[in-house]
Image (cartoon, rainbow, N blue to C red):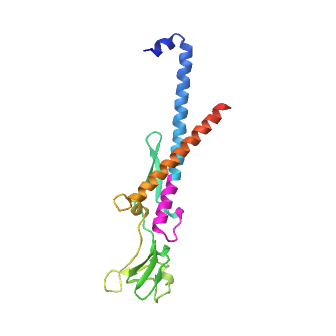
Amino acid sequence: MIDINRVVSKSSKSYEAIVTQFKELRKNVDNELQIATKKTAKLGVGIVAKQVQQELGGKLTQREVKKQIKYTPYGQTGQQISIKKGRRFSLKRFTPTQNAVGVTYKMRQRKTALGAFMGGAPRKKAAKLNGHVFKRIGKARLPITKLTTASPWGVMNPNTSRLPLMDFAVAEIGIKFNEQIQRRIQSAIRRNSR
């Protein structure tokens, strides 16, 4: 067994130089890891938004879905992607058409909201209702409620039956993290070779 401290202590100047190099290296590694995790988190938000958009369908954009997804620092170098338990999307975004039975809309396949309405007559939208879909609560004319779909939190919630969707997103984010680490290593090598 070789005691490194005893060997290096004979030349204390080289020991101090090695220690400072390792401290700088540690600082650089932490910085590179922080950059890689932050970029991966940004890409992860896009991956989750794309999964939600594909699951819900309709005329949703990733920008609308991303408003409810954010990433925050976690620990010294980590990032955490979280989905706010936010607002649900109106059926207005899912090509609703009114017919005699109710309102049909398309999420992944055509569905019907029985007894719902959009305007005064079938296939016409009332301007004051802004194209939203409503349903009466009781037999009386009022009160009415606006019909909505699931929120991004509801789509990606692990307590629901969408676990394969969450597993797929986690696997994709892991692949992106590996790519970012490789990219950061290559850039550090290029910087040090100059």
Q: How many marks?
A: 0
Residue 142 picture quarter? bottom left
Secondary structure mostly seen in the magenta stretch: helix
**Left or right of 38, for residue 144:** left
Figure quadrant of the C terminus: top right
> Residue at image x 53%, y 32%?
27
Q: Quadrant of the N terminus?
A: top left
For the residue pair 37 and 124, the one nearer the viewer reads as 37
Judged from this view, the residue extending furthest toward the right is 194
Is 4 situated above or below 106?
above
Residue 46 vs residue 67, the one in the foreground: 46
Horizontally, residue 105 falls left or right of residue 32, namely: left
Residue depicted at x 58% and y 42%: 183
Where residue 62 appears, x then y in whole percent?
A: 53, 62
Q: Position of residue 86 (x, y in %)?
A: 42, 62
Vertical placement of residue 82 versus 87, above or below: above
Instruction: Where is residue 69? Give x, y as percent.
Output: 47, 57
Seen as rendered, the residue at the extreme front is 1
Q: Is residue 50 magenta?
A: yes
Could one spot residue 103 in this view of the protein?
A: yes
Q: Which residues are magenta?
A: 44-63
